[in-house]
Image (spheres, grey):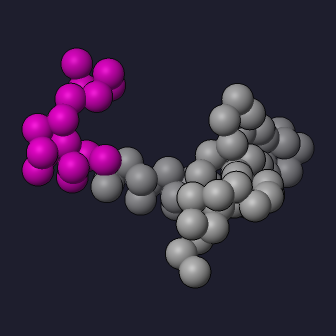
Amino acid sequence: MPSHASPRPGVAPSGDPSTGEIRVPLQLFVLDHPVGVVDLVLSHVEAEHHHAALTWQLNRAERTLGYVTPQAV
């Protein structure tokens, strides 16, 4: 069955300054029906790697598709 996770609406990611841990609240779906919630917990290093990978993908999409993000303006 196709499943996915999306950021939980209305709940912001949070961080623990003492450990550097980042928590990303997610909602889980099966066939686009919500089935639960979970927090993705990342170490500081993992969060940095994901941030870099997402930034690279977003920048690549902007170049390919001509998108303009607020940072690029």
Q: What's the residue at 74%, 33% (across, down)? A: 11
Q: Is residue 11 left or right of residue 45?
A: right
Give the overall secondary structure of the magenta segment. helix
Is residue 70 one of those drawn in magenta? yes
**Which percent across, then down, holds residue 29?**
65, 61
Q: What's the residue at 42%, 53% (across, down)? A: 54
**Which percent across, then down, holds residue 7?**
62, 46
Q: Is residue 55 left or right of residue 69?
A: right
How many numbered callouts?
Answer: 0
In-front residue for pair 31/59: 31
Q: What's the residue at 64%, 58% (across, down)? A: 33
Q: Work out which quarter of the rendered image holds the N terminus and state it.
A: bottom right
**Which percent across, then down, holds residue 28?**
69, 60
Residue 35, image quadrant: bottom right
Numbered range of the magenta stretch? 58-73
Q: Is residue 4 left or right of residue 44?
A: left
Can residue 33 be seen at all in this image of the molecule?
A: yes
